[in-house]
Image (cartoon, rainbow, N blue to C red):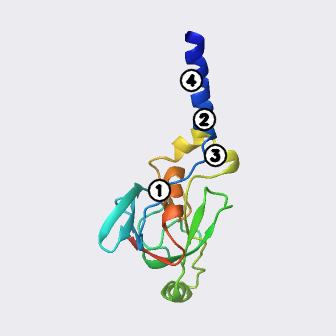
Amino acid sequence: MIFFHRKLFTVFIIFLFAMPVSGEQIPNVDRVVVYKKKRILQLCQGDSVLKQYPIALGKSPEGHKTREGDSRTPEGRYILDWRNPNSKYYLSLHISYPNKADKQRADSLGVNPGGAIMVHGYPTGKSASLWNRYWFLGRDWTDGCIAVSNEAMDEIWTSVKDGTPIDIHP
């Protein structure tokens, strides 16, 4: 009897780890909203919040991004305009920063506005160990991107279409 339970348990564990990772699709997402101070990303339909996730931001999260290398996350309305399934982070959705106003502000300051701001999961490759994943929880660590857990990124990836607006609030 003990042999049967061990065998059943082993089959269960193999099945559990063999399952493909895929996020639940949240239907009808027409807008993504981020509240930087609250560290929350919301998937919305109209004024209704369908799902929300905790986030990490850039290492200097307060204020609007003004230049390349400032480690700030931009504020304002942008578009999630394309996706990268092979990024150095677990999946990534590109935020259309800088927009025209961002470029004008940077020009007036004589600086490069930066770019490549994404919504993404944890790092992949050598940094993807379980230990490193726990290191990223509860702290701001990106260079200005919006980071979520890989599990959250699976849901966001399957629920948000290219062209969806993202509103990033202080």
Q: Give the spatial CA distance, label 3 vs label 1.
A: 16 Å
Q: Give the spatial CA distance, label 1 vs label 2.
A: 32 Å
Nearer to the camera, 64 or 91:
91
Specify the amino acid type for callout 3.
Ala
Q: Secondary structure at mark 2?
A: helix
* Residue with the mark numbered 3: 128
Relative vertical location of residue 142 with respect to residue 5 in this rendering, above or below:
below
Relative vertical location of residue 113 with respect to residue 90 in this rendering, above or below:
below
Residue at image point 59% right, 30% down:
13
Splitting the image into 4 quarters, where does residue 69 fall?
A: bottom right
Specify the amino acid type for callout 4.
Phe
Callouts 4 and 2 close, C-beta under 8 Å: no
Q: Earlier in the sequence, mark 1 or mark 2?
A: 2
Residue 62 placement (x, y as % from top left): 41, 66
Q: Give the spatial CA distance, label 3 vs label 2.
A: 22 Å
Q: Earlier in the sequence, mark 4 or mark 1?
A: 4
Q: Secondary structure at mark 1?
A: loop
Specify the amino acid type for callout 2.
Phe
Whether residue 81 appears in this view of the structure is yes
Splitting the image into 4 quarters, where does residue 35 fall?
A: bottom left
Specify the amino acid type for callout 1.
Ala
Whether residue 170 appears in this view of the structure is no
Q: Is residue 159 left or right of residue 13?
A: left
Q: Nearer the viewer, mark 1 or mark 2?
A: 2
The crowd level at tag 4 (other Cα within 10 Å; few <14, some 14-19, many 20+) is: few
Callouts 4 and 1 close, C-beta under 8 Å: no
* Residue with the mark numbered 2: 15
* Residue with the mark numbered 4: 9
